[in-house]
Image (cartoon, helix red, strand yellow):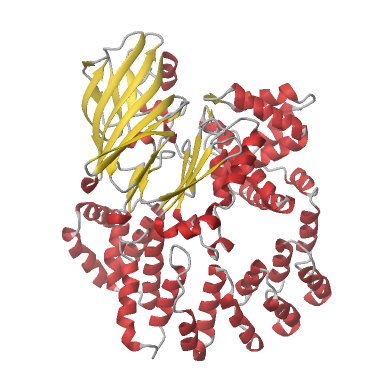
Amino acid sequence: MKKNILPFFLLLLPGISLAQQTAKVDFITADSDIRFDISERKVIGNVTYDFTVLTEIDTIRIDAKNMVIDKVLLNGKTVDFKNDKKQLKLYKGYVKGKNSLAVSYKTVPKQALYFAGNGLDLQVWTQGQGKYTSHWLPSFDDENEKVIFNTKVTFENGYQVVSNGILDKKVSSGTTTTWSYKMNHPMSSYLAMIAIGKYQVSTEKGADNTTIESYLRPVDTSKSETTYKHTKKIFDFLSKETGFNYPWKIYRNIPVEDFLYSGMENTTSTIFNQDFVVDAIGVNDRDYVNVNAHEMAHQWFGNVVTAKTRADHWLQEGFATYYALLAEQYLFGNDYFYWELYEMAEKIQKESTTANNTMVVSEGATTLTYYQKGAWMLFVLKSQIGDDNFNTAVKNYLEKYAYKNVTTAQFLEEVQTVANGFNREKFEKEWLYNNKFPIKEALKLLSNSPFITNYLELIEKQNIPFSNKKDALLTLLKGDYPEQIKKEVVYQLHKVPYAEAKEFYQWIATSKDLKVRQALVQIIQEIPAEFRESYKGFLEDPSYVTREIALKNLWYQLPDYRQALLDKTKTWVGFNDKNLRITWLMLALGTDNYNKEKKPHWYSELSDYATSKYNSNIRQNAIQAMWFLNPYDSNVLPQLVNALVHHKWQFQKLGKDGIRNLYERKEFKEYFDKLIPYLPDDEHEALKALLSDDKK
C-alpha cells in the first residue's frame, strides 16, 4: 500500500518529540461514536480514550486535522485545551496512572474519508494510510502508538456499515441503525476504517474457523465467483505459511467506487477498488487475486507487526508482496512464481539505474523498492538459509513482536537465531543497503527455473533473422510451453511480413489460448487483406481488452465493414468502466450514414457518462471519446471543471490538463473566465486557483 508520510516530529514543538510522548503515555482503547451530515459531507463524532500516564509529561497531543472540538472531558471534568487544527493539546487534568479522555468534535474531512456516488448509490469509505485517519477521527499519525479501536457508526437504514473487528450489536431506531464493532487487539491508527454502502454479503469459513465475508453491490452478485474465487484458499495458505494463527477473528473484502489505490489492508476489513469486481469475461483480463493476497498478507505483516520507522517500511510492503507471490505460487505453480520474480527483477534493475534511492532499508526510497525489491530480498534470504529456517524465523518474529513495532535489525536477529552460518553482514551489504540490484546473483537464482532459462534463450533470438529462427519459433508456438514463451514468439513476429509469418497467424487464429491471441492483436498495425476474415474472429474472444482492440482496428481499417461491425457489437458494455460501450458510442457517432436518427440519443448517453453520476473511470473514458469526436466540444468543459474537485488525483489531472490546453484558445479562455462566478464554491476556488497559477 503506497504511503507518503511527514515525519511526525516535525509537527511537534521543539523539545517535545512523539517518541517522548509514547514513552511517557500509553493509549489503550478508543471508543468512538460516529454520525454523518450527508448534505454537508460532515462527520459528527465522539471518542473516548483510556490511557495511562507512565511518567511526568507537560503536554499530551492527539492529531486532529481541521476539526472543530466542541468539548473535552478529562477524567469526567471539563478541561482547557488548545486546538490548532492540527492537534488537540492537553496541558493539565491528567494524573499518573489511568485516565479517561472524551472528545466531541465535528469536521468536514479534506482527506482520508470520502463520499462516492450519490442517492441510492452513495458510498462512504476511508483511506487512512498516506492521508491519515486524524482527518476524521482524533487519533495518532504515528504507527508506533497502537490502540484497541471500538467503533459505533450510525447511518440510514438499508445500508451495510462496516468498521474494524467483530460486529458486536446492531440497533435500529426510526430511520437509522447503529452498528457497533469491537476489536480484540491493538493496532496503529492508519488501519482504522469505515465503509458504508448498499451491499450483499456472502460468508465462508477459513480452515481455522475464521469468518470470511465478501461484499458486493446487489448489481454485481453474479460476479462473486469470478471476483472472490480464491479468497478462502489464499486465507488458509497464509495462515499456514506464516505459522501464526490469524488473530483478528474475522476478515472482509469490501469493494468501493473511485478508490485511491488498488486496495488497503485495514485491520479485519480490506477496502479495494471496484475495478477488480469482474465477470466471467473480465476475469480473463484482470482479477483480484494478487491484490487480495497482498492486502490479506498485511493482516500479519503491517497489522500484527508494524514497522517502527519509514526506513523499515519494507517489513510491511516487501513482506506483503512476497507472501502474496507465495500464495500465487500455491495457486498457479512454479512457472508463474518465477515469471513474476523475473518481471520484478527487470523493473528493479531498470529503476536502479535511474532513481536516486533504491536502497531497501532507507527513508524516501521508491515504491518499487519497498514492494518488489523488498520481496526479492526475502526470496534471496529464503534461498540462502533454506525454507525451514526461513519459516521458523518468520514465525518467531511474528510471535515475539505481535502488536508491536519492529525494525529490520530485529527481524534479522530472528534469522540469525535459527540459521547457523547466515552471513548477516554480507546479506545487508549486498541486498538491503545497496542502491544497486545484484543482477548476476539474481539471474543465478532465476536459472533454477527451466522455464525462465528457456525464456531467456528465446529473448536472445530477437535479433536473429526470422528465416533463421522460423522453425524453432513455430515449434515453441505449437508446443506445450507456458503462455509467456508463446507470447514472446508472437512479439518476435512484429514487422515480419504476413507472407512469411502466415503459418503463425493461421495457427493463432484457430488457437484457444486467449493471451497468445491477444498478443497477436496487439502487434498487428495493419490487418493483412488475406487475414481479415480470420481477424474478425477476435471479436468473439472472451476478453474485453482483445475485443476493444479488434473493434477499433476493424472500424479504422475496414470502412465498408463499419455498419455491420457496429450492428454486431451494439450490446457490448465491457468492464465496470464501460470501455466497450463508450468505444461503441464513439465509433457509431463517428460513422457517416449510420442510424442518423439515433445519434442525438447516443450523444446524450455518451455525454451523460461524463457527468458526476458515474465513477471517474467512466467519466474519463466518456470525456476522451467526446474529444475524439470533437476536440473542442463545449459540453466537456463543465465536466473538466468538476474534475478539479474530485478526490482521485488521476481524474483531477485530466481536468487540469484539459483546461490548460483549452485555455490557450481565446474563445475558451473567455468561457472559463465567465464561468467562474457561477460555479459551486469548491469548483470556483479550484478553477480560480488553477488559472491563477498558470498566469504566474
Instruction: Please state the horizontal and vertical placement of residue 615, each as a whole percent of the image.
Output: 37, 59
Rendered position, 588 above or below 121: below
Identify the residue at image location x=59%, y=41%.
235
The reply to whether residue 665 is visible in this rendering is no
The reply to whether residue 282 is visible in this rendering is yes
Quadrant location of residue 586? Answer: bottom left
User: In the shown orientation, is residue 472 left or right of residue 115?
Assistant: right
Instruction: Please state the horizontal and vertical placement of residue 539, each as a whole percent of the image.
Output: 56, 77
Viewer-proximal residue, 112 or 347?
A: 112
Instruction: Please state the horizontal and vertical placement of residue 366, each as a whole percent of the image.
Output: 55, 43
User: In the shown orientation, is residue 425 left or right of residue 625?
Assistant: right
Rendered position, 395 above or below 234: above
User: In the shown orientation, is residue 668 left or right of residue 31?
Assistant: left
Q: Quadrant of the C terminus?
A: bottom left
Quadrant location of residue 428? Answer: top right
Quadrant location of residue 456? Answer: bottom right
Identify the residue at image location x=72%, y=21%.
417
Identify the residue at image location x=35%, y=66%.
661
